[in-house]
Image (spheres, helix red, strand yellow):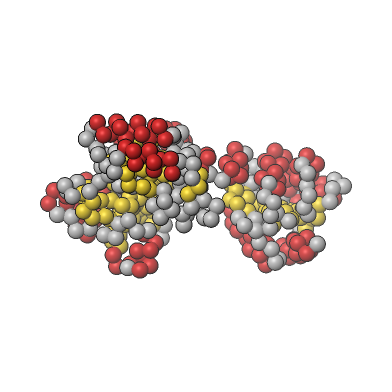
Amino acid sequence: MKVHEYQAKEILDQHGVAVQRGIVADTVEEAVAAAETMKKDGVDQFVVKAQIHAGGRGKGGGVKFSESVDDVRENAEAILGMTLKTPQTGPEGQLVKKILVTAAEDIAHEYYLGVTLDRAKGQDVIMASTEGGVEIEEVAEATPDKIVKVWVDPAVGIRPYQANQVAFALGFEGQALKDARKFVTALYKAYRASDATIAEINPLVKTDDGRVVALDAKIDLDDNALFRHPDLADMRDEAEEDPLEVEAGKHNLNYVKLDGNVGCMVNGAGLAMGTMDLIKLAGGEPANFLDVGGTANAETVEAGFRIILSDPNVKAILVNIFGGIVRGDRVARGVVEAARNIDLTVPLIVRLQGTNAEEGMQILKESGLPIESAIRLQEAADKVTAALEG
């Protein structure tokens, strides 16, 4: 689950990470009021930042420096309601509904700092670079030698020497070195405590007066651990997510929209990936990844069909079920019931194997519905090809 910058900073602040203060606003007037409040505290220059679940906001015009409260008003009017397009939003962009008003900082240097899991090593890895303000992928491609990595055993946690190693690698000295060590330690602890999949600061800055501060923050949370963090689960902003994926989540379906023409409904992630390969070999392109899991029933199958058919690019649907926990006859009844309840306007191919597959195929045959059944993978592929050509 992604969270906004201002929410990520709230999480970091709770764990002692030094963050740039700011006030979130939903309207222009709220942004102006935020700036006026900050001005009373001695802030005379501001930054207005769009709050969307994507990086590269500055490149798209979503981050604007403001020399006065009047500039905050002007920039808030320009950013709120805009469709912000960045390399991470794609060409469709993302509507800006919230902005963050922060104090402008006098920056001496920008750094990158992030924590994530290195699956190959089975350990957390802290990544740091003196090339802050630049996407880490660009740094890795252009100057990989400028990325420092320190691995941390999650069973032990971060040790003082590891925080020192990162701070020294970034070139900090004096009091800034001590602050950087505390910063690295606090960031790692925030990452672990929140069950994050990544905690990223870009840029981390050293100000002209020597402070070490997170100017921006990105945290992605592990959906599977949210039951441990009801306060963090409340940070979810469904308006920033694909509406079809939100709807699928309500029915416990794992759905990811793609750009193809063949909808697929499968049980099990591995079989789903294999089915997507099958679709490509048949001459089509998968329109989605949809895993109904091991407890598929009529309700979940119908919900899956409705989600798939809401994509106008879908020209055919392939249901590929291997009955292990789930029974083939149960899936077949769900398919038949769903097909009768919805307006099925595209060819439907169903392949059943495993537990009660023969009973399921008989149910499909006796339904009287225009459902193409298949037993072997090649047979299903041929029927997908015929459906697309037809």
Question: Is residue 244 something that shows in the picture?
Answer: yes
Q: Position of residue 63 (x, y in %)?
A: 38, 48
The answer, for residue 252, to whether it is visible in the render is: no
Percent of width and height locating residue 300: 67, 41
**For residue 373, which quarter of the picture?**
bottom right
In the image, residue 328 sits, relative to residue 137, either above or below, namely: above
Residue 389 placement (x, y as % from top left): 78, 64
Q: Where's the C terminus, which quadrant?
A: bottom right
Q: In the image, is 219 to the left or to the right of 345?
A: left
Q: Left of 234 or right of it: where is 369?
A: right
Query: Which residue is found at the position 22% from the left and 59% from the top?
Result: 169
Out of 329 and 65, give the one closest to the viewer: 65
Closer-to-camera residue (267/43): 43
Q: Is the residue 29 above or below the residue 71 in the image?
A: above
Residue at the (30%, 32%) spot, across then down: 36
Q: How many callouts does the rendering have? A: 0
The residue drawn where x is 68% and y is 58% is 261
Judging depth in this view, the residue of 237 and 332 nearest the camera is 237
Residue found at the far left of this picture: 174
Q: Position of residue 221 (x, y in %)?
A: 43, 44
365 vs 310, left or right, is right
Which corner quadrant of the image does residue 384 belong to?
bottom right
Point 25% across, 39% down: residue = 44
